[in-house]
Image: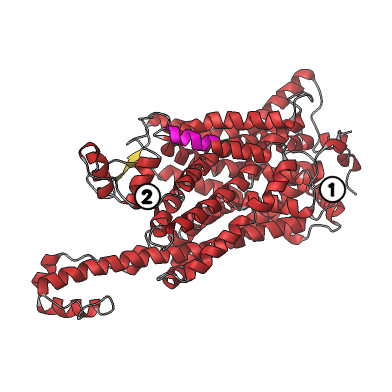
Amino acid sequence: MPSKELTKVPNEQDRPKWDNKIQYLLTCIGFAVGLGNVWRFPYLCQTYGGGAFLIPYAIALVLVGIPLFHLELAIGQRLRRGSIGAWNTISPYLGGIGIASLLVSLLVGVYYNTIIAWILWYFFNSFQNPLPWSYCPTADYNNTGAYEECSRSSTVDYYWYRKTLNITTTINESGDLQWWMVISLAVAWGAVYLCTIRGIQSTGKVVYITATFPYIILTIFLIRGFTLPGAIDGLRYLFTPDIKNLLKPRVWLDAATQIFFSLSLGFGGLIAFSSYNPEKNDCEKDAITIAVINSMSSLYASIPIFCILGFKATLAYWDCLDSNILSLINEFEISEWNITRDNYNEVLGNLNATYPKIIHHLKLKECNLQAFLDQSVSGTGLAFIVFTEAIIQMPGSQVWAVLFFIMLFTLGLSSMFGNVEGVLTPILDLKIFPKSVPVEAISGLICLISFGLSLTFTMRSGNYWLQIFDTFTGSLTLLIVAFFEVIAVTYVYGIKRFSEDIKWMTGRYPNLYWQATWRFISPLLMGAMFLSYIIVQFWTPLTYETWDPSYEKFPMKKVQSYPGWVVAICVLLVAIPSMCIPFVALVHHVKRKLTNKPNYEPGDHANNLN
């Protein structure tokens, strides 16, 4: 039997609880299912051979994702603490794991809510007719530069890089704060604060909308997507596997990374949410249910996304054909009825056989539908450039724009609840503030500090910094945190004691699958992922893509290397949270040596909560 002292948490009667099981499940699903499911997962499928990517993704889900998801839910439910409190309860030497999780949640929330601010900016402007990203500014005397920049790129590129970001040409030029982005960011943090003002007591009410509404809109887009020309080509591209991509190590690394970020492992939010559960709760069933729903949501979101990508590729393919057909009609005086999109290749072949020099002189465009489908783009590029371009081609574009950005807003907002809770719950558990300070004030302080840090991303160079935070705060650090979590539970707290706890909570002992993954498979795979990541990053130069209107080549995007001082910041974003783990352990070790106290046995602190 487990140690019953573990259940005697001080002030347990004062700890908030979920109103019902559905509320808890929806909150966890909303936290896990976020923007990455809509724009990161489809991009990876597109990049790595469609259905072939699902193979390493499924393997990573089964061998790493679900076991760690179960572990976090179980440890939070059993120890009734947030991330810092839970690991301190097992051993003070492990408190650094919780601090690392708190810092990652804070840093990710800072840049993640900036993306929500961008979404709000587009949402507010979606009510204009015509949509502001569907046309270039007029070419008058005072607007020559803007018109030239737009005409040399595209309307959606111009609206994103110039009208929204007003981006600089390099990260070395910080630029001023953009007032429209500051206002949008304030609205975004205000929305987060109102939804998390009293912790789970307010978040639990909002998730009924934020966790379910995206599925309704996705279904609407799915139905509309099936009716668009080129939708079948997009779906065929998604589900046709290119098996040779499985030989690339990067495919497996990206699949595992996607699992970590998508399931929100290592953030501390899952531990916080499960700590408000009743102790007698089937956390194993919860873990499997939420993880499977999250992965199915990624696949479900990919279907309308690829329908619309297929539609966009088909329109580009048709435009290419029409341009070539017009050139042939003008050159050979062919009747437009004798050459169409359907017989273009046949007519072109006959003309090329008869007049090869003339055809060569015309310099016709190479029209290949597969090439247009291969033009992959991820993240903000998919949402604010590719998708907005597809939307303006659809009848009733304003309605589709409003629905699309409402969907992104609710997806992002529900994920922000977990990031804020990953900071709020440990602070409440540590009792940093006196009891006289209400939860509402602490939540407000967290949001206010985060808003101040987020102002960095509202500068003209803000997009470059957001890409850095996205790359370095939510990848390797999460892997390190999760690795130490499973080591702490398995080999410090003890797998036998943990298994007994789970049996006490769920009524059954963890089976061979859980035992094998926690003890051996997950730690070994995470170790291999860590080494692979270091090797890949070492051999890959740190570069970033800039928007430069003076750049001669289309589409005015230039790849540059990060300056040395920026590389140093990239290293610090990974090192500071990660180094909290050994630093806290070292501090406690030195402290005990100086006071001549004996070292803690594994789990001693957990057995003395009372």
How far apart, in angstroms, are the residues tagged by discs 1 and 2?
52 Å
- Residue 351 drawn in magenta: no
Q: From the viewer's perspective, is 81 left or right of 607? A: left
Q: Which residues are magenta?
A: 178-186
Q: Is residue 53 visible?
A: no
Q: Residue at x 36, y 46 (%)?
A: 159
In the current view of this chain or complex, which residue is farthest to the top?
A: 594
Please provide percent x and percent y for residue 471: 49, 43
Q: Nearer the viewer, residue 234 or 563?
A: 234
Residue type highlighted by circle 2:
Trp
Q: Nearer the viewer, residue 227 or 477?
A: 227
**589 to 348, vertically: above or below:** above
Residue ID for mark 1: 279
**85 to 280, vertically: above or below:** above
Please provide percent x and percent y for residue 31: 64, 48
Q: From the viewer's perspective, is 380 left or right of 83? A: left
Q: Nearer the viewer, residue 389 or 509?
A: 389
Question: Which of the numbered marks, if any, corresponds to residue 133?
Answer: 2
- Residue 179 drawn in magenta: yes
Please provide percent x and percent y for residue 380: 45, 48
Quadrant of the rendering where the C terminus is positioned: top right
**Element assignment for label 2:** helix
Would you identify the image quadrant in which residue 546 lies?
top left
Pointer 1 or 2: first along the chain: 2
Q: Residue at x 19, y 79 (%)?
A: 347
**Element assignment for label 1:** loop
Label the magenta part by its dominant secondary structure. Answer: helix
